[in-house]
Image (cartoon, rainbow, N blue to C red):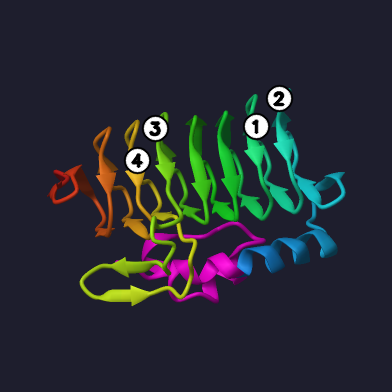
Amino acid sequence: MIETKALYDCDVPYLKELFSSCEYPWELLPKIKDHVKKLISEGIEGFSELKSGVLIGKNVVISQYVTIEAPAVIGHNCILRPGAYLRGNVITGEDCVLGNSCEYKNCILLNKVQTPHYNYVGDSVLGNGAHLGAGTVCSNLKSDKKNVVIHGTEDHATGLRKVGAFLGDGADIGSGCVLNPGTVIGKNTSVYPLTPLRGVYGSDLIVKAQKEFVKKAE
């Protein structure tokens, strides 16, 4: 349930090789910086340079008061709403919404990701069609500042101090949720609003509380 291939079907041409090289999704995080710099150096067909270190695809809408720090790659047809803050090492696929007053740092958003309102996405990977409700955050730093461990059926040491959340394709997180460092949400799983989560949750679930979830009906 926590392998990269189990969470994501990556069809983004400039991300396929990166995803296939990582058995687990947290292995992507330390590779984002070098990968985005490589993309900018080599260029991507159909992309143009917005400014030094920032590539954007076709039909990208950038509203007023958006801040984009290099390096970053923004895919075709994405919308960056007022107040969006990209702090560097951000890569998106196509048709994403980077919402008002949202912050992004060292993260990957695959195609059609929706983060519309007041979200924080740090050191995280959001799958195709994933959605964060208003005010939901991907917390990426433990209070004790120790390295993050993924707590599933067994523990996985990431060796990283900053790890956010990994949302599989189609994951839908309700408003006001806190995804604690190292949280993994499986494909097509939905989470009730105002739910703090920690650990690993499988695919096709409805999560009502940290330890309360049911399988979605067929």
Q: Earlier in the sequence, mark 1 or mark 2?
A: 2
Within 10 Å of the Cα at label 4, are there few (<14), some (14-19), or many (20+) other Cα atoms?
A: many
Residue 69 location (% of width, % of height): 74, 45
Q: Secondary structure at mark 1?
A: strand
Snapshot quadrant of residue 95:
top right
Return the residue at label 1. 80
Q: Earlier in the sequence, mark 3 or mark 1?
A: 1
Span shown in magenta: 1-30
Q: CA distance from mark 4 to mark 3?
A: 8 Å
Q: Earlier in the sequence, mark 1 or mark 4?
A: 1
Return the residue at label 2. 63
Disc 2 + disc 4, Cβ < 8 Å: no
Disc 3 + disc 1, Cβ < 8 Å: no
Q: CA distance from mark 3 to mark 1?
A: 16 Å
Residue type for callout 1: Leu
Within 10 Å of the Cα at label 1, are there few (<14), some (14-19), or many (20+) other Cα atoms?
A: many
Q: Secondary structure at mark 3?
A: loop
Residue 133, numbered label: 3
